[in-house]
């Protein structure tokens, strides 16, 4: 963090830029206040399959470095086959032996048709890797497509208010960790 600025790294659990989760993540980035620098990590597909005996490769090292340099991480994930998308889980598996997420403020938005299973599973994963996530930093948006307009933007005011509350909770967590 630099001079009361906060850096947030956004990570979509979907590899498709046109997915609801990716579109929502881009919109969420626009809702942060001016003192927050929001950047989306967009190279998830470059991370090789996890192998704990393998040396850390450049894409993995870059992923871990971006997490470490951010003051917070905001995930926006879909649900595939009642679970966490494989590419995202694979990337997170690479971070387990690092301290990238140790006490890192994190927020989670699950945007899916249902989403309960992926939301619960990824919440457990975030806990297992030592991230700092509050209950106010978790948001499940079921039936996401009914809440988006043709441009992929949230049209539902209650959902927008919930997203704003999650953003405020994440900023508060960062500020409490950084003693701002």
Image (tube, rainbow, N blue to C red):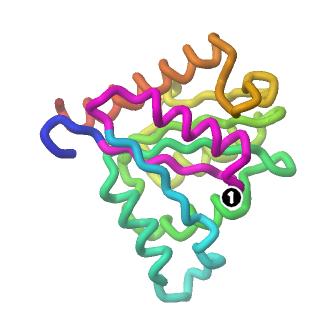
Residue 143 drawn in magenta:
no
Residue situated in front as seen by the camera: 38 or 118 = 38
Residue 104 vs 32, above or below: the answer is below
Q: Residue furthest left?
A: 3
**Residue at position x 76%, y 29% from top?**
150
Check the picture and name the quadrant holding the N terminus: top left
Residue under label 1, please give it: 15
The residue that appears at 61% across and 81% down in the rendered structure is: 51
Rendering coords of residue 64 (x, y %)? 42, 66
Q: Is residue 82 left or right of residue 58?
A: right
Above/below status of 2 relative to 63: above
- In the image, taking residue 146 as reference, residue 108 lies left or right, namely left
What residue appears at the point 13 percent right and 39 percent down from the top-left corner? 3
Q: Is 140 above or below relative to 26?
A: above
Count of marks, rendered view: 1
Mark 1 element type? loop
Q: Report which quarter residue 77 is drawn in.
A: top right
Q: Name the residue nearer the viewer: 38 or 108.
A: 38
**Where the C terminus falls, by quadrant?**
top left
* Up-down relation of residue 160 to residue 72 (above or below): above
User: Which residue is farthest front?
Assistant: 151
At which x and y percent is residue 113? 83, 34
Q: Nearer the viewer, residue 165 or 97?
A: 165
The magenta region covers 7-36
Mark 1 surroundings within 10 Å by alpha-carbon count, few (fewer than 14), some (14 through 19), many (20 or more): some
Farthest residue, direction right: 81
Give the percent coordinates (x, y) of residue 169.
42, 24
16 within the magenta span:
yes
Rendered residue at 46%/27% (across/down): 31
């Amino acid at each position: 963090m630099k001079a009361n600025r906060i850096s947030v790294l956004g990570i979509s659990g979907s590899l498709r830029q046109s997915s609801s989760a990716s579109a929502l993540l881009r919109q969420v980035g626009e809702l942060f206040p001016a003192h927050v620098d929001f950047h989306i990590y967009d190279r998830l597909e470059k991370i090789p399959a996890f192998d704990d005996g393998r040396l850390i490769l450049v894409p993995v090292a870059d992923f871990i470095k971006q997490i470490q340099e951010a003051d917070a991480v905001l995930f926006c994930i879909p649900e595939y086959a009642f679970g966490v998308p494989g590419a995202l889980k694979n990337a997170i598996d690479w971070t387990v032996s690092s301290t990238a997420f140790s006490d890192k403020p994190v927020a989670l938005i699950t945007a899916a048709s249902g989403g309960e299973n992926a939301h619960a599973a990824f919440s457990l994963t975030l806990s297992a890797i030592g991230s700092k996530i509050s209950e106010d930093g978790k948001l499940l948006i079921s039936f996401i497509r009914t809440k988006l307009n043709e441009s992929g933007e949230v049209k539902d005011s209650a959902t927008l208010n919930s997203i704003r509350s999650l953003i405020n909770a994440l900023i508060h967590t960062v500020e409490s960790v950084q003693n701002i």
